Image (cartoon, rainbow, N blue to C red):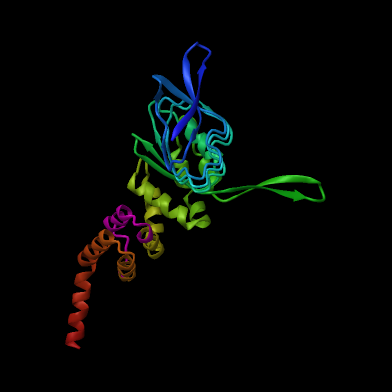
Amino acid sequence: MAYCYEKKTDRKGNIYIEITGYEGSIRHLVIPGMIENIPVRSIGKYAFSGRKDLCSLTLPETIDTLGRQAFYNCKNLTTLSLFDSVEDYYDGVIKQCGNLHAITLYQKRNSFSVMKELLADNDRMLHFCVEPMGLHLTFPAYVYDFVEDVEARVLHHKIEGSGYPYRECVTRKGVDLLAYDRLFSHAADDDYRAAIDIALDRLMYPLELETQAREWYEQYLEKNVNIVLERLIEDGRCEEVIILCDLCLISRDAIEPALQLAAREKQSAITAQLMEYQRMHFAAVQQAQAMTLDDW
């Protein structure tokens, strides 16, 4: 694999590298911070557009410009890591990246500008991890469409899904977490997958989480614990299962089906965690029932 690039000069006379693409095939692309001892500051327009081989992408702190449709229609791209050093973000950088779901943003300037741009650029469900502040947030999907008013001969825009108001919680200076949490009922009604991830993210990383919001999230997970466990077990998410156990949100009726599914999926760590939870919370009940049957 070889990078294609150009040497350019900014308005102050500083020489920098702009990546324009690469030759060959690669699944996990890590853009270097320096080439020929010159800082890599820009990803050119259409540089990686339409690449089907690209699965993960890591950008260095030196990058300050993402060109138009730089990663447009990279259908197999799933994860992206970058810094808040990006100042110039052009249209369509991650548009049509239908499988992109996890973005890690490393902050050095305490800026959320590139996060806001990424959210505006992609209407699918996205999970953001903001480091080092330890902020984990899920943003649901939404659909922006137009409806024709035949009689008036005009088009009206129509937004479906809770993802748009969630994105409005992000400004260039930060995230309004109070407003984010208050939107949860919309996500719960709209998409259970997003609602599960939102609730788990906020409980696991409770930055500025108020008591009322915590109760909303716990009640939702407890009420829907069967489907929550099914999703977590199938995805092998042991850490989230541990959170459910720590919060005592798993009912007696849910534990047996969950153990059976974990065994079928060969999730040994999850199975061990659920068995320990069962022993701690339900063993006494089972023993009492057995004694009652013996007496009868």
Q: Is residue 154 magenta?
A: no
36 in relation to 117, above or below:
above
Q: Residue furthest top?
A: 13
Q: Quadrant of the N terminus?
A: top left
In percent of width and height, residue 119 lies at: 52, 39
Q: Is residue 273 visible?
A: yes
Horizontal arrangement in the rendering, residue 211 relative to residue 194 (left or right): left
At 35% from the left edge and 49% from the top edge, which residue is drawn? 203
Q: Is residue 239 magenta?
A: yes
The part of the chain drawn in magenta is 233-252
The overriding secondary structure of the stretch rendered in magenta is helix
Horizontal arrangement in the rendering, residue 219 relative to residue 14 (left or right): left
At 48% from the left edge and 55% from the top edge, which residue is drawn? 188
Q: Residue furthest bottom?
A: 296
Horizontal arrangement in the rendering, residue 294 relative to residue 212 (left or right): left
Horizontal arrangement in the rendering, residue 285 relative to residue 75 (left or right): left
Closer to the camera, 168 or 16?
Answer: 16
In percent of width and height, residue 42 lies at: 49, 26
222 in relation to 210, above or below:
below
At 33% from the left edge and 47% from the top edge, which residue is drawn? 204
Closer to the camera, 158 or 259?
Answer: 259
226 in relation to 247, above or below:
below
At 20% from the left edge and 67% from the top edge, which residue is drawn? 279
Closer to the camera, 8 or 169?
Answer: 8
